[in-house]
Image: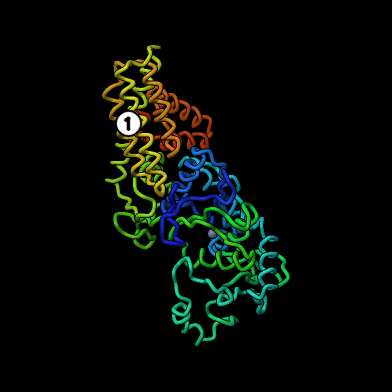
Amino acid sequence: MKIYNTLTKKKEEFVPVHEGKVGMYVCGPTVYNYIHIGNARPMIIFDTVRRYFEYKGYEVNYVSNFTDVDDKIIKKANEEGVSAMEIAERYINECKQDMEALNVKPATHQPRATEEIDGMIRMIETLIEKNHAYEVNGTVYFKTRSFKEYGKLSKKNIDDLEAGHRDIKVRGEDGKNDPLDFVLWKPKKEGEIAWNSPWGEGRPGWHIECSEMSKKYIGDTIDIHAGGEDLIFPHHENEIAQSEACNGECFSKYWMHNGFLNIDNRKMSKSAGNFFTVRDISEKYPLQVIRFFMLSAHYRNPLNFSADLVESAKNGLDRILTAIELLREVADKNQENMTQEEAKHFEDIKGLVKKYEDAMEDDFNTADAIAAVFEMVRISNSTVKDGSGEYAKKILEIVEKLCDILGIETTREQELLDDDIEQLIEDRQTARKEKNFARADEIRDELLAKGIVLEDTREGVKWKRA
Ligand SMILES: [Zn+2]
């Protein structure tokens, strides 16, 4: 299996630290809002990587964190007049709900930064002991120049970075010895959540969180560290510096990064008005379609999100699901054995499994893997209709397995039938009569989520499919 390693800028053969096992760490979201569609890309991609390793028989320890203390969380908490923990808790739950809808498997470990503070403090203490860090008035900084290989992941030259920071140095901002140094521990500000530490009350910097959680849940050397390419610098570069300076071991053997997601060929941003949460998108498309869409491109390429492209992904997925329905129908219909003619076609199908695997083993080329599934569907559609049950069953097993690796559910979501809708509308009317407006609203929202719009008119309630 070959993986493109950001560290070496080459595709490399995957050799695990421990035979038969994969330890992978994927940087998780900072939970101050619903996750956006850009957050969904690494979740889907690396979940698929995990699923492929599992298909190959590896035992995967998949660790992905929640950053549940951060300036943005504190800001949001102050705006709402609630605690930072309340904000974090709320959006962790919402995030888990979105991940489930995207069919992202729960991580083996899903640590929260605030529950790992002790470990972070120990790591910072070790860095100070080893002379890679120092404290100034309650702030602990990492001594960037003390780590000789700084810049090896992002391919940045430390002296160029220094030049870029000169203005800060001139202004003599904060108590750093060197403008390149970054924060490991910051002191408490008025009204902020804080933990006790040898340097007074405060909280950890963002980078140290991931260094500590990957060490604790996987080990000093992990197989794969992954995330969006926007995390390469400074986040991942700083993680390497901290972890390798602390542990004296290689931090991660392989670094995988997914490309950006653009909306209608433009960078997604709130100011440009093209910012979408996964929740927003789920009102327009089944998230299953979004998952399939994301896997239709190579993960390292930028991906453009547009209505046309999502629509074509929807049609593609539909073609696969329709073929699976036909296979199920034939498999159930008869007990006949495979004919010689069918055995020949089945050999072609098996050849396509090889093609699928080759694509996945070439740096997880899901686009080509999906192309192999489409070829199977084409053969199946043209041969299975009057075929034997055995033939249909065998193809079905393969197609279902390959879809499962991609995290594509092969059973269509049941659409609401007219009778069910009428029944729910009746329940809603009853609830209203009983002044149970909460229940009435709940039913309306439930229907809306399934694309049914209600209209209260003088002649009663009318409904239509959106
Ligand atoms: Zn991280």
- Left or right: 215, with 321 as reference point: right
- The part of the image, by quadrant, that contains residue 407 is top left
Q: Quadrant of the C terminus?
A: top left
Q: Position of residue 339 (x, y in %)?
A: 33, 15
Instruction: Give the residue at x 36% y 22%.
Output: 327
- The part of the image, by quadrant, that contains residue 200 is bottom right
Residue 33 visible, this orientation: yes
In depth, the one of 316 and 453 nearer the eye is 316
In depth, the one of 416 and 162 nearer the eye is 162
Taking the image in four quarters, ligand 1 sits in the one at bottom right
What amino acid is at disc 1?
Answer: Met
Residue 32 visible, this orientation: no
Q: Residue furthest bottom?
A: 170
In depth, the one of 328 and 129 nearer the eye is 129
Give neighbour class at mark 1: few <14, some 14-19, many 20+ (Cα, 10 Å). many
Task: State how the image is colored.
Answer: rainbow
Ligand 1 near label 1 (Cβ, under 8 Å)?
A: no
Figure label count:
1
SS at mark 1?
helix
Q: Position of residue 206 (x, y in %)?
A: 57, 64
Q: Is residue 348 above or below residue 188?
A: above
Instruction: Give the residue at x 37% y 63%.
Output: 271
- The part of the image, by quadrant, that contains residue 172 is bottom right
Circle 1 sits on which residue?
376
In depth, the one of 286 and 390 nearer the eye is 390
Instruction: Give the residue at x 32% y 53%.
Output: 304
Q: Position of residue 102 (x, y in %)?
A: 45, 42
